Structure formats: C-alpha cells, structure tokens
C-alpha cells in the first residue's frame, strides 16, 4: 500500500487580523516570509500518513483544529510550518455548506461543484439523474441554495461528491445533519466506497460512526495530536477523557458530600491480570476488589460496592447485606482504631464494554441505613468491539 | 505547492465562472442587458453634451470625425477595462465561502470576472460601432482585426492588474476605497475625452508614459483614420503586458494559500 497523503510536522498559526493595524502587521510578516508574530496556533506539529484504501477518523473537542487540518489536507490553506504531500488525483471535501454559493440554485451549484470535482459535461449529464435521486430534494433543486435547510444542502453536496467518485473523500461532520434515512444511505455509500478501495478521512463527533467506518483514528486536542493509532484504542481514550472531564465538573458541584461517620473505609484495592498505574483488564476479564472497613464499636459494618462509568453513570451495585460471611473480621488494627473487617468481591468475567470505570467501596452502618464513608478506584477495560452500551449482555444469534 | 489536488487552471470550471458572472451581472436583472448598452450611451451623451455644447471643445486632429465618434471608440474599451478591474478587485472577498472552503485555483475568480466584463462590453462596443457607422461616421473596418488585437491586449492588462488588486484587497481592505478614485484619475489622465495633441508639450511627454494612451491612440488610428503605424512603443507593450500578467499570477499564487487567514 502506498502513501496517499502525508503530513510532516504541520503547524498552522492564524495571524490576528481584526484591527487594521493587526492586518497590516500580519501582511508585512507574510510579505517578508516570516511567521505571524501574534497569532493563534491552532495546529502544532501534526504528522500523519494515510495510505491508499485506508480510513482515518479525526476526533477531538470543538476548536481542536480538526477543520483547519482538513483545510490543510485539501490545500485550501498552506501550513505555517511543515510539509504536506498528497498524491490524490481527485479529492472531495464534504462539509456543511459544501462550498455552495447561496445565491444560486441547487442545479447551478451542482454544475459548478461537479466542474470543480473534475466531471465533464458529458459525465455530469450521465450522472445527473443519480445525483438528483441521491439528494432527493425534489423541486427544491431549482431554488436558490440559501432557501435550503442544512440537511438539504448536505444531501445535495453528498450527492455530487458521490457521483464524482473521488480517490480521497474527506468529510467534515456532515452525516450528523441529515435525517436518519439519509444518514443510512450515506453510510452505505461510504461502506461501498471503502470496499472498492477508496480512501476516507472522516471528522465526526460520533464515535459510533468513527468506529464503524474507520480503521485508524487521530485525536486532536488543542491543535496537537493526543493519540493516533487503532480506532478502538483512540476513541476509547477520547471518551474516557471526556468522562473524566465531566466527572471533575461534577465533583466540584458536590464537594460537600462524604459524611465521615464512625464506620470508615480503610482501603480498597483492585486486582487484575494487567499491570500498570491504573488496573486494566480485557473486556470479559477478571477483576477482584478487596475492601477493608473499620468499625469503632466492633460491630461488623455493611460493605457495598458500586460500579460506575467514569462519568458517574451507575452500572451495578452490590452489598454484603444478605451475603452472610462476606464480611470477615481482619486482624492488624492499629491502637484505638477499633476492629477491621474485610470483604473480597470477585468478578470472574466482567463483561463491561471498553472504557474507563470506577469501583466505589462504601462503608455503611450495621443497619445498612447510612453511607458513612466512600473510597473509589479507577480501572480501564480494553477491547475491540462495535457493540455499544455499558455491558455486554449474554446473547446468541439464531 | 506540493499537492496533487486539483488546483490548476481548469477551463471547464473557468467557463462556469464566466457564465455565472455574466448571468449574475447582466442577465438576471430585467434591465441588466439593456443597461449594459444604455449606461455607457447615457454617459457618452452627457460627455458629448458637456464638451460639445458647453465647453465647445474642438478636437484639432479629429478631422471630419465628429466628437461623439471620437469619444465613443475610446470610451467603450476604457469602460470595460475600468469596470473589469474594479469588479475583479472584490472577487476574492466576495467569494469567501468558496475560497475558504474549496481548494481550486483562486486566480480563476478575478480572471473570470474580467473576462465576463470584457465579453459583455465587447458586445456593447460592437453595437455602438455599428450605430456610429449607420449614423454616418465612416469606420475603417478593414483594420478591425488590429482593434481586436488591441482589445485582447487590454483584456490581458486588465487580468494582470486584477490579479494584483484582488489579492491585495484581501490583505489591505483599503484597496476597495482607494481603487475607484485611482481609476477616475487614470481616466482623466488618458486622452479619452480629449486628444493628446491638445496637451501642452511637457504634459504630453509625461502622459505618453500612460499605457492607456497607447491603447486609445491605437484604436482611434485604426478605426477612425485607417492608420496603422508600428513603432517602438508597440514592441514594448507586446512584451510588457505578458510579463505583467506573469508577475501578477506569480504574486497571486504566492499569497493565495493565505487568503483564508484574512477573510
């Protein structure tokens, strides 16, 4: 497989051009071939390679530089630093607005766009029916594009691009706009396109789409490559990062929690087959959790485990109440600490979907009425799957 | 740039751009096409009235040719040139949606605008020449090919200037304000309303450097007097204009990758 597109150390600095003086400064730097002095570095040191027939998903939060990266890839803008090599003869960028001229009718824009994409008049005439059928916007085709809904613009844009059969297809968050049935049509088309050896670069906020359509993924964060590689690993890390961020926000909101009563969690340890800073296991693997509780009055407290996803979505909870013998006395308490109790919970086949999770250990009073203390530990579940949700439910196909 | 994407000059797309421009400017409003002929005719009438009735101007070297014909043959090419440059200067900013989203050879935008203006004014010019002939001004049609060559050179010069100003206007917005008075100044320093022979010697020597004088004189000589005299200036212009066009293109392409930063 040969390399189709290759970026090496690409950076893009947007000069500040709001005030006339800034424009002049920026233009002077440009004339002198210098980098803009003041500017926003929206991309820094991005290197990537897309081989023929490959599919790369580009993900990242809003403003991470995804669209700028695409503009560099297609050659709309030149990078401030670094090199871009592209061997694609025909490349189509599909995005919101689709490069259409709002004042002109859909038909005019189809002609214009197909000329831009390299279709001859004859080819267009042959494929016009297909384009209109694919877009399926009826008589609106003769209306100015400014009267279109965003979904209709994307429909038309996709239809033209589909008809031009490009070597490299670059889509910027377009599938989210179309309705359900159009999305399906597009995804089917992209599937076929990839099956026939087409090369795809897809920007999307839908990890489902990225995982479905791409083999590799690039995670951009603040203009830098945060992760680049196998699509499952990168998207999982990305989702986990989002969950962690949401969790921090949530924690700020409920700082006041955590009633330090008599019964306390002394320790919570997780054991998995993997090693590393955070415990890690394959989906369906084994997880063992050891919870040690302290009881000042010698009565055995009730231990409880709560399994949540990193963003706090509950997955499963279980307590030692109603499991006689689960809570065992433990020696080794320090002076004045009271009695120690231990419960060990083992998930032999933890069928969690890949992602990051927390296991919380709670200490309840012996009556099981009040949560006195909580300690939590994070762990990561690895795996390659296109299933979605929190857990894999046992199932079979008939 | 090292990019295999279609960024070269694309004749098919260029034709689309030209046709689109023609339709947008002249055919899509009711008066557009009529206006194309009416507006310069009106202006011509105003100038003719002011100069022949009020100032009682006489063109010393006009001979039997009336002032109106003398003015008209030079006025139309100038109008095309000036309108083409002014219109083309705003094409990059005016097509920001296209320029900042789609990779294509951006120079096609100003060039298409210049071309469409020249095409449409070319039709108007032809109509006016026919009217002049019918009204009794003897035109030397045998030398019309010379006029065509001159008009093509004028078109190329407009293209060259359009490339400079349209790209410059992206970076320096003031160009939009500076250009119209500059073109007016150019108009009055070109012997269009008057004849170069009416100028004092020192002024005539300075004005001779104005390339537009060369066009105007050449067109008048050919059409009105049937004269064709090749000289030193002709060689200079035939070399200079392609060089300017080449430089304009080089300048434009050097900066086209940065348009999006400033739009």
Image: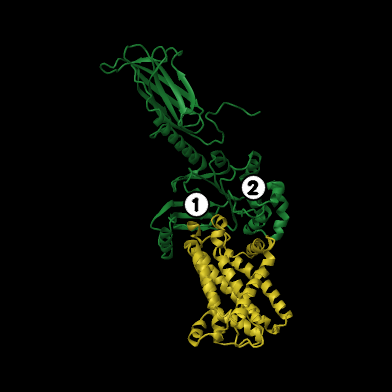
Chain colours: A green, B yellow
Q: Nearer the viewer, residue B135 or A190?
A: B135
Chain for numbered disc 1: A
Residue B212 seen in the figure: yes
Q: Residues within 10 Å of mark 2 (few under 14, many from 20)?
A: some
Q: Residues within 10 Å of mark 1 (few under 14, many from 20)?
A: some
Mark 2, secondary structure of its residue: loop
Seen at 68% across and 54% down, the residue is A107
Q: Which mark is residue A112?
A: none
Question: Where is residue A379 drawn, in percent x and y?
Answer: 43, 31
Q: Which residue is mark 1?
A: A68
Mark 1, secondary structure of its residue: helix
Q: How far, Cα to Cα, is label 1 from label 2?
A: 26 Å
Chain for numbered disc 2: A
Q: Nearer the viewer, residue A351 or A238?
A: A238
- Determine whether, in the image, residue B159 is placed left or right of residue B262: right
Residue that lies at the very extreme toward the front in this rendered image: B54
B52 w.r.t. A232: above or below? below
Residue A131 seen in the figure: no
Question: Where is residue B179 drawn, in percent x and y?
Answer: 51, 68
- Determine whether, in the image, residue A369 is placed left or right of residue A87: left
Task: Looking at the image, tell me whether mark 1 or mark 2 is earlier in sequence order.
Answer: 1
Q: Which mark is residue A148?
A: 2
Seen at 53% across and 71% down, the residue is B183
Question: Where is residue B31 drawn, in percent x and y?
Answer: 68, 63
A188 w.r.t. A332: above or below? below
- Determine whether, in the image, residue A68 is placed left or right of residue A155: left
């Amino acid at each position: 497989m040969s390399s189709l597109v290759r970026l090496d150390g690409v950076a893009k600095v947007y000069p500040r051009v709001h005030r006339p003086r800034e424009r002049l400064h920026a233009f002077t730097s440009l004339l002198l071939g210098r980098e803009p002095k003041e500017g926003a570095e929206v991309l820094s040191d991005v290197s990537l390679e897309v081989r023929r027939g490959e599919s790369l998903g580009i993900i990242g939060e809003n403003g991470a530089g995804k669209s700028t990266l695409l503009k560099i890839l297609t050659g709309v803008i030149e990078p401030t630093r670094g090199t871009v090599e592209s061997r694609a003869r025909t490349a189509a960028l599909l995005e919101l607005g689709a490069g259409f001229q709002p004042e002109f009718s859909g038909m005019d824009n189809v002609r214009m766009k197909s000329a831009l994409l390299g279709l001859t008049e004859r080819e267009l005439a042959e494929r016009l029916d297909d384009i209109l059928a694919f877009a399926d916007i009826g008589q609106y085709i003769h209306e100015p594009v400014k009267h279109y809904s965003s979904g209709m613009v994307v429909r038309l844009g996709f239809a033209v691009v589909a008809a031009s059969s490009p070597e490299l297809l670059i889509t910027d968050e377009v599938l989210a706009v179309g309705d359900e049935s159009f999305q399906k049509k597009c995804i089917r088309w992209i599937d076929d396109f990839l099956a026939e050896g087409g090369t795809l670069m897809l920007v999307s906020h839908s990890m489902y789409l990225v995982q479905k359509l791409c083999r590799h993924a690039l995670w951009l964060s603040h203009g830098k490559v945060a992760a680049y590689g196998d699509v499952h690993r990168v998207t999982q890390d990305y989702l986990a990062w989002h969950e962690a961020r949401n969790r921090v926000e949530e924690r700020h909101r409920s700082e006041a929690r955590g009633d330090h009563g008599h019964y306390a969690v002394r320790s919570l340890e997780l054991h998995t087959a993997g090693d590393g800073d955070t415990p890690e296991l394959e989906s369906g693997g084994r997880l063992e959790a050891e919870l040690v509780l302290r009881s000042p009055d010698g009565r055995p407290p009730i231990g409880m485990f709560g399994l949540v996803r990193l963003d706090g979505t509950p997955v499963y909870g279980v307590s030692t109440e109603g499991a006689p013998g689960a809570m065992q006395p433990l020696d080794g308490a320090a002076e004045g600490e009271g009695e120690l109790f231990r419960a060990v919970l083992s998930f032999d086949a933890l069928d969690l979907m890949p992602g990051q999770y927390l296991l919380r250990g709670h200490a309840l009073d012996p009556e099981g009425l009040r949560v006195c203390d909580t300690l939590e530990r994070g762990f990561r579940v690895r795996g390659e799957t296109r299933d979605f949700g929190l857990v894999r439910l046992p199932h079979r196909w008939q | 740039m090292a990019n295999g994407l279609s960024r070269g000059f694309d004749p098919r797309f260029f034709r689309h751009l030209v046709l689109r421009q023609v339709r947008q400017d002249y055919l899509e409003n009711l008066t557009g096409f009529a206006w194309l002929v009416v507006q310069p005719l009106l202006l011509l009438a105003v100038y003719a009235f002011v100069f022949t009735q009020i100032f009682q101007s006489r063109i010393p070297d006009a001979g039997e040719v009336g002032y109106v014909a003398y003015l008209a043959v030079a006025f139309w090419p100038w109008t095309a040139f000036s309108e083409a440059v002014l219109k083309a200067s705003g094409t990059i900013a005016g097509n920001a949606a296209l320029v900042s989203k789609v990779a294509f050879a951006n120079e096609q935008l100003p060039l298409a605008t210049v071309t469409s203006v020249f095409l449409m004014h070319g039709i108007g010019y032809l109509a006016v020449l026919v009217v002049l002939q019918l009204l009794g001004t003897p035109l030397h049609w045998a030398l019309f090919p010379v006029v065509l060559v001159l008009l093509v050179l004028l078109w190329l010069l407009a293209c060259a200037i359009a490339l400079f100003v349209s790209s410059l206007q992206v970076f320096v917005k003031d160009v939009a304000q500076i250009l119209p008075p500059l073109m007016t100044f150019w108009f009055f320093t070109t012997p269009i309303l008057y004849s170069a022979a009416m100028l004092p010697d020192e002024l005539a020597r300075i004005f001779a450097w104005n390339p537009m004088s060369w066009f105007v004189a050449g067109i008048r000589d050919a059409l009105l007097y049937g004269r064709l005299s090749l000289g030193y200036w002709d060689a200079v212009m035939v070399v200079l204009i392609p060089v300017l066009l080449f430089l304009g293109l080089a300048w434009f392409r050097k900066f086209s990758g940065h348009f999006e930063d400033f739009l």
